[in-house]
Image: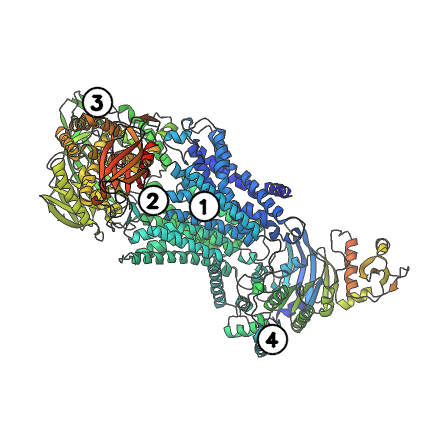
Amino acid sequence: MSDCRSEAAKTKKEGKLAMLSIQSLTHTYPNGVQALKNVNLEIPKGMFGLLGPNGAGKSSLMRTLATLQQPTHGQLMFGDVDVLKEPDAIRRLLGYLPQDFGVYPRGSAYDLLDHLAVLKGITNGKERKQVVEGLLVQTNLFKDRKKKLATFSGGMRQRFGIAQALIGDPQLIIVDEPTAGLDPEERNRFHNLLSEIGEDVVVILSTHIVDDVADLCPNMAILANGEIISKGTPSDLIGDIEGRIWKKVIDKSELDDHKLRFNVISSHLTVGKISVRVNAAENPGEGFETASADLEDVYFSAISESRKNGTQDVDADGNNAAAA
Amino acid sequence: MMLRIALSELRYMFKSPQTIVSFAVFFLFTYFAMASNNVQIGAGGNVNVNSPFALTQTFLIMNVFAIFSVPAFMANALLKDIDHKFDGILFSTPITKADYLFGRFLGGFAALVVALLGIPLGSLVGTFMPWVDPETLAPTNLGHYFTIYFGFVLPSILTMASIIYAVAVMSRSIMYSYLTVMALLILYLVGFRLLNGPEYREITALLDPFMLRTFTEFTRYWTAVERNTTIISYEDVILTNRILWIGVAAVFVTLSFLLFSFRSAAKQPKQKKDTTNSAQQALAKTIELGVRGTPSWGRSTAIQQFLLRTKFEIMSVFKSLPFIIIILFSVFLTITSLISRNVGYGLDAFPVTRLMVQAIQGGLSLGMIVLLIFYSADIIWRERTSKFNEIIDAMPAPNWVFVVSKLLALAAVLISIILLGIIMSVLVQLASGYSSLEISLYLHRGLFHFAIAPILTAVLCCFVQVLSKNRFLGMLIMVVYFLSTIILFQFGFEHPLYQYASGINPQLTDMNGSGRFIEGDYWVLAYWAAFAVLLLMLTYVFWNRGTLQPLKFRLRNISAFKKLSFALPAFAAFAAMIGTGAYVFYNTNILNDYVTADDTEKQAVEYEKRFRQYADLPMPRTTDINIDVDIYPYKRRVEARSTQILENKTDTNISTVHMVFPPNAKVVSVDLSGANLTSFDEDFNYHIFDLATPMVPGEKRTLKFETLIQQQGFAHARNSVTLVRNGTFINDGEIAPYIGFFPGGMMSDRNTRREYGLEPLPRTPKLEDASQHGNNYLRQDSDFVTFETTVSTVKGQTVVAPGYLQKDWVEGNRHYFSYKMDAPILNFYSYLSAEYEVVRDAYEGVDIEVFHHKPHTYNVGRMIESVKDSIAYFNKAFSPYQHKQLRILEFPSYRTFAQAFPNTVPYSEGIGFIADVAGDDSIDLPYYVTAHEVAHQWWAHQVMSANTQGGTMLVETLAQYGALLVMEQKYGKDQIRKFLKYELDRYLSGRAGDPEGELPLYRVENQQYIHYRKGSVIMYALKDYVGEDVVNRSLQRLVNLRGFQSTPYALSTDLLSILKEEAGPEYHGLIEDFFEKITIFDVKLDKSQVEELEDGRFKVLLNVEVAKVYADAEGNETEADFDIAVDIGLFSKSPAAEGFGADDVILLEKRYVTEAESVIEIIVDKKPVFAGIDPYNKLVDRNSNDNLATVENSKTVEALAGD
């Protein structure tokens, strides 16, 4: 892979080498729904967070990157490999954790992981044993390795999914909603695991949980309604709105009125009252206080901005999307 | 509330596809059954297509198919909430369990009932189609449709619905509901196949949930009239059956109620105690972390992945429950089919490998189809079904690894089932002590050849599944495909080049193996294999990884064929397909004519149209035959050269001579002295000669001709089974002409004739038609002829023809045999050529020879013994045997009959040669068949009958009589009773199926159920009533009167008048009842009681009922006086019991019982245990099981006598 870096260097952006380049990616489903609209992204090595509400097109994008879906048009390059034309080549570099997956009704965790390791090209039996056992330990599934996968709980199954995505030292790791269903301890374990490997390879983390991105990703983008509405490093993005965020605690009955009059980007319930946050260049008065901007504000600002721009069909509500 | 739920369920079901689909399917099914002339259920003969009988039969059969619809309604009604994960919400609402459960049941069942209304409606609409033959229709009676559907079909559906509902409640799985359906169906099929003998009829009638057997049993001996007018009713066995199954339904409904709970049981996690937890942790610590592996890419990786996937797919199938069920039932089906090798009269054949191979194929084919449909879906959709597809599809294994491993797994599963079948066959053979296993036959026909078509079908299944939007659509397409293969054939689309994975029936026999039949089959299979390669490539190209793409989108992938690595094999496969296809076409359509069953009909019609006008022209008759025949078994070719003498036996001058050569014969040359060929119709080989000077009465002319018959290559169907490598069997009808218009070329089936606007043809001329008294019924263009033949075959084979061997010699690689008959014979001769073993014997100057296939030695001894016994008996009873020799010749089982030519009896390997006459009680089939054929040397070859009604009575009935005589002498009366029970049953069952109506025996029109079956019963009863010596004396007189006579030939009335003279006037009524009328008796022993008298003797009182009716052709009955004497018997043991003998008979005498109900008083010395009226079933009695009863002890005999 070393020789493709110079290739990627041409698409240098924000001071980093872009490994994965997505150009004017568009996908329209047969029923006319546009899942992706002219998406352009340059993704460098390291962790990359893709944030977006439900139905934004994250999974469509992930599936397209994972060679599971042919876009209507557009170009995808990983290094010098054309993802769309050479799917087999990209699969050899890929580790993929789908958003929602099941397992075969028969077979233990060990057997199935071993099976997948063969498919990933680990043909040496001894080496495969090391790989499989190591991953089982790292995902804390070792003691359950002989149990039928089908009997695993959602969290255990998710960990199995993570383990399989890491087989064979993939250069491109795509994880779609990886922490869904994990308890906080497992989530931490997973974050550690990801950040360990995330330095040398491209890791795309698709999520609607802002904290995941905030904790892990040096780069990120926000996808809403099939479009990239914001991208950059989290700190840059936060910097962009620093000083524009105002908060206030109001009664429930006042919410609608506030939503009408102010650019309310999010609202939280706090002890029977509602805390609202507003994005505005100047203090709107009426008791609003200044608040320090965080990534969540970035996210909600972007979403609410995109919604105003006529993309009314996004049904995600900003009220408690960050509840996790 | 319950009703509201039911109604909402019904409304929901109305909108869902299963209602529409089921209705459509059943409507079409019955519509076609009614409207098409090719499919007929229950009707035929004089039975109308919309008669209550035919409707009931159709509906009940549809009822069996209907169970496939049941889960879609019943299980769905219950499970759709669970499937849609709506159960959590629904079950927490305040409806009661009963409301919910029964409401859904009622709603689902009501929808099912409506959907199945397609059955009666399709039938009804079908009758109004303009092309339905009005002769076969009765006026529409809506009441019949209503009563049958609601009265008899619905209860069965209710039973099935309740069972499936209960299964759905218990398993909460649609799949299990379907599996239950399959299990029930296979259990049903297997169960009733096992219980197939007449002795099980009552029990199967009682148990059949679909009431089919019940219906069959209830209507078994119904006549056409009854079938047309009577609707079955709730009585007897039907009532019991329905009560039983409604009871079962009630049990299952109750069970559903008891077992159902809104709460689904929490699954108890089966966790082993974590005693080893610390050990596990310790172990985990030793494991090196961070090793991610270095993938290697290349051919060997792909192969390793392929092997892994293949093994995985195979094991997934092997470990799945449906597979185990299919295997179990296939094993069951196969074993049944392996052990039921019935060859008639309750006998089985030896388990020769050929029969085993055929049984495997019969036993497995159903399971294979289910397996193909179900597992192609399961395998292809495995990843998507388990939602594991996104992970697997993103794996770096090439597409072919998945496509090929899945297909290979399907093939491996098929092959493993076949191997299991073979293993079972071998076990069955070994268990029955049969050790000459033909392993090579198993491997070739049992495994290799048999597996090809299913594997090709597996490719199609996979292709369809890959292209389908979902697996259910794919399964539906395959079901439709399997049905279409049957239906297309019915509609005359027979060509194997468009029937996927079809072939050319490669018949298997012991004598000739697969013969050359299999060559054509392999060519067709090669053609379809090439096509399958293309399908496989398309499957690969359309293989969808990741998100399911619409077909339109995937079609773009076809551009893969632009690549050379793809285009080359595709082109090669395509070229192979064109090449093999062309070769097949050359064989089926150019070397042979592609003639479908419909074409054959049309040809017969055309023949009649062109030539029937000549039917009554006076023609000369053949008197002398000299014919040389060369048989080339390997080329499947026969050449014949003949010189025959024709004589004008009429009293007019003959100026034109017509002759029809056999349709498949090529006439190389034909020359009639003093005649010019003026017309030759190539289509029908019809020759017309004009005579320069007419033949005057008594004048003779010489006819010379050369003919050639050959099986060229292979045809798509109906390949010649007479011209084969080992076991050639041809007769005069294939090589020699018929002089004059050949009536046998016309179509005889009266319904088909009506379709073509032709008047019905009389089956046989009337008894009184004097113009036919000088014609025999075999052929009307000759009488007794002289016969001489020289025939050759390849060295190593023996060829036999009628006549005595004059000499034989070898010239080159040809073996010549010269045969000559010393006295005139009928113009009816045959040639059989094969690699024969000969067993020789002699009896009173008659040489006996059995030419048989080497391994078939089992019954040769019985045959020889039968020949000896028969000749001895018939010489004494009838007249001296006219020949000095009798030869039996085995021929391959392409055809299964035995036939009597002069001093020559061709005998199929399929009937007597491999019959296993094991038990002392079994009927000796080879002995019986041989005796029957030997008797034909008298009854056909000495006394020939005229071409009128009753002709076959003198030939076949008398041959049966002859066989009965020798069988009784050898095996005793008990065996005969057993034999006659089969005969009586076959006669009575045959009556309703007769297309033109029944006739009295003396007017029989070549109706087998009359001249064989009724003939046996009547002749045995006659012998019993008038005495054997009277019958035999009459037959002697018949030989004296008509033996070797052609002017005139014998008539059935000749025999009857002699019989009446010999038997005396007291038997005239009896002889008329037996022969001249269709007489049905009904005698019954109501009860019998015994009382010990003071003198130590016993007084027995028998309450008997007797009746006699005369039936007409359609079965309308008129009562008649019971005016014959009938056997009354008292026994110390049941005559049906094992080991019953003469000692057990206390009394057996004939008595006149004239009253319909009367009490008979008998005093005997010994105390009887059983009593009976006509206890040995000598009379034609539709209920022969009520003739016998145990005798009750009684103190109050007086009271009984009084009531």
Q: Mark 4 points at which residue?
A: B290
Q: Mark 1, mark 4: which one is toward the viewer?
A: 1
Q: How far apart are marks 3 and 1 (CA)?
A: 55 Å
Discs 3, 2: same chain: yes
Q: Mark 3, mark 4: which one is toward the viewer?
A: 3
> Which tag, 1 or 4, sits closer to the chain's start?
4
> Which tag, 1 or 2, sits closer to the chain's start?
2
> Which tag, 3 or 1, sits closer to the chain's start?
1
Which amino acid type is marked by label 3?
A: Ala
Residue in the picture at 24% in, 25% down: B767
Answer yes or no: do the residues labelled 1 and 2 have beta carbons within 8 Å?
Answer: no
- Which mark is drawn over residue B770? 3
Discs 1, 4: same chain: yes
The quadrant in which the C terminus of chain B is found is top left
Residue B922 visible, this angle: yes
Answer yes or no: do the residues labelled 3 and 4 have beta carbons within 8 Å?
Answer: no
Compared to residue B968, the image places residue B670 above or below, namely above
Q: How far apart are marks 1 and 2 (CA)?
A: 35 Å
Provide the chain ID for the residue under circle 4: B
- Which mark is drawn over residue B199? 2
Residue B797 visible, this angle: no
Provide the chain ID for the residue under circle 3: B
User: Where in the figure is residue B239, as x and y percent of width and height?
Assistant: 45, 39
